[in-house]
Amino acid sequence: MAQTVRPGQLELAPPGLGQRLATAVKVFFRLLAHSKAGFLGFLGVLFFVVLALAGPIIVPDAGRPDMTKIYQPPSLEHPLGTDYEGRDVLKQMLRGGRAIIVVAVLAATLSTLISITFGALAAYAGGWLDSIIMMLTDVVLTIPQFPLLVVLSAFVKLDRPWLLATLIALLSWPTLLRAVRAQVLSLKEREYVEAARALDLGTTRILFGEILPNMASYIVMSFTIGMTAAIYAQVALYFLGLAPLAGENWGIMLNLAWVRGAIFYKDSLMYILAPVLAISLLQLAMVTMSRSLEDVFNPRLRES
Amino acid sequence: MRQSTPIARAPMIPQLAARRFASVVFRSYALRRVLKAALTIYLVATLTFFIVRLMPGNPVDVYIHTLISQYGFTYDDAANQAAALFAFNPNEPLLVQYWAYLRALTRGDFGMSLVSPGTPVTSVIMTYLPWTLFSAGLGLLISFLLGIMLGMVMAYQREGVLDHILTAAGSFFQSIPNYLVAIVIVVFFGVQLGWLPITEMRGAYSPGMQPGLNLAFVKDALYHAALPILTYVLTTIGAWMLLMKSSTLSTLEEDYVTVARARGLRDGRIMRSYVGRNAVLPLFTQMAISAGFVVGGSVVIEKIFVYQGIGFILLDAINRRDYPVMQGIFLIITFAVVAANLLADLLYSRLDPRIRVSGGE
């Protein structure tokens, strides 16, 4: 083993991780620029992220309940009308995105971590490890996620963002894992990975140094899909009143508008429509972005 | 075929026999799928058992405690009462209880409802499950059939006006959560425009209707299921259209289609027997995933339209903390989804022998 060539000894040293990530980000934007819809989706996601960060700063206070002004139609003072306690709907809308997006980001981070680690491991190691991981993935994939989440909510008080995020993430990784595994399987056969293997760089180094940096766009895509799933699940839980209705977010607004009967008032159309529209647009933006990434980045995946 | 090497280097006889058995199981696609399905159901049943029995503040302890503090039961009486309701004996070791629970499940015994005493969970399930199977199944079927038809049209008229409109509409409805579509239907068409009598359409069938297989009842059931079905179709049809379009496009490039054209076969026949049949095959695996999604989503959809199916009753049981009903419904939903998966995979491997040969990956 004395003659192993170290990468540093070669004249063409491989680029560092930072440099590679910069390239990956550049590639990501180039890919997005290819499709108008994808770019629009990206702008939409950006808008909602900025809203989540800045919303509660712009509107530091949601306003006090005012029983003389309940269920008012949209006016100059209250552009989206008022809710069942006379609070301004627009203010709640501006403040209510953060909680949703925070949980979505937490859940997506966790499920992306799980699926990338084990998906890459399964694809790279192969053999019995692959079989076991895939078996487990198939089992979790077939368990109906949302009913399980609903049942779990009867036992666990979902009052903390990280708890909600963890539960959602623990149920939503299988689809991502399958996609990551397929991707690593195809990357594994590329020349540069073969070369790294010939240099005897070790599994960890090859996985994290060679394969994963080349999946950056792909990871962004998985992350977006994970966020979509998390938003679907958590808003549904809030809407059904299965997660505590403390604090303010679009899911809770939806629940209160529904339960307190706002849907039956013609004046309250904007009150119930505002969270519906916001959540739909957010989902639409993320799906559009991830789909155009998928199209450009890996058209083969869609067929399999 | 990567699994064939271990057999060659196994000289010992008993090991050889075991390996041969394992390899028979592994090679048979159907057997492997059935085993996987059984394993899933077993794991879910186990998970449910331990959630209900071992979680802090688990329902059994809570129930025993309520009986003692509110109704003045002695511990033994309370424990016996709980045992009868939850169909287990709390004095036995956990493993024995677990075994008894599994045996009861195989008999289809899910225990008794806590909130309505004397009602077996099985009868609750039998009352409400058919409505979910009816509405979700019909929704899936309509969506699938319409989706593959539209998908083929889109592929044949690629880049046409219809293709662009349907692609946009399909992706739009696909990305919006299905319960939001349901809410918008209620708010817009039910309340604001007043086109739909949403309060009258609630329930699985009209009060006073005698369930039976006659035209009037079927019509009534369809009337009440119409809005859930519409929601399921709207939110799943996009996926079918887009999948069918891409599948058709790749099938159109196959040699046998070119040959069929060269033979001068009529376009309609090529479309049906050559393109359609092959293009629809890859969609079958998607059917199972879609079924799971629709059944899962039915929890919210049935709540919104007040449609008394299994999802509606699951929420009801959760709100009333009726744990045996909750547990039973969750198990039956899992069972339904696993069975749908199994059926779809087996059907697919029948229809497309390539799957069985290459190992189903």
Image (spheres, helix red, strand yellow):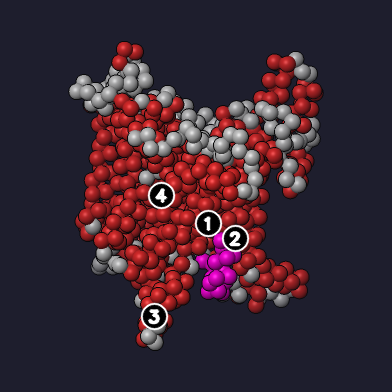
Q: CB under 8 Å between callouts 2 and 3?
A: no
The numbered dot on residue B266 is: 3
* Quadrant position of the N terminus of chain B in the picture: bottom right
Residue shown at the point (47%, 32%) measured from the top left: B199
The chain under label 2 reads B
Q: CB under 8 Å between callouts 1 and 2?
A: yes
Q: Considering only order in the chain, which callout, 4 or 3, is on the residue closer to the N terminus?
A: 4
**Residue that badge 2 annotates:** B343
Q: Main secondary structure of the magenta part?
A: helix
**Residue that badge 1 annotates:** B288
In this picture, residue A79 sits left or right of residue B123: left
Residue shown at the point (44%, 47%) measured from the top left: B230
Q: Tell me the magenta residue range.
A: B342-361
Residue shown at the point (34%, 39%) measured from the top left: A279
Does B228 appear above or below A185? above
Q: Considering only order in the chain, which callout, 2 or 1, is on the residue closer to the N terminus?
A: 1
Judged from the image, the secondary structure of the residue bearing numbered disc 4 is helix
Let me know if residue B339 appears in the view: yes
Q: Which mark lies nearer to you, 3 or 1?
A: 3
Q: Which mark lies nearer to you, 1 or 4?
A: 4
Judged from the image, the secondary structure of the residue bearing numbered disc 1 is helix
- Amino acid type of the residue that numbered disc 4 sits on in the rendered structure: Leu
The chain under label 3 reads B
Judged from the image, the secondary structure of the residue bearing numbered disc 3 is loop
Residue neighbourhood size for the residue with mark 1, other residues' Cα within 10 Å, grouped as few (<14), some (14–19), many (≥20): many
The numbered dot on residue B234 is: 4
Distance of label 3 from label 4 (alpha carbons): 33 Å
Residue B57 coordinates in the image, percent (x, y):
62, 27
Residue B31 coordinates in the image, percent (x, y):
65, 65
Residue neighbourhood size for the residue with mark 2, other residues' Cα within 10 Å, grouped as few (<14), some (14–19), many (≥20): some
Distance of label 1 from label 2 (alpha carbons): 8 Å
The numbered dot on residue A104 is: none
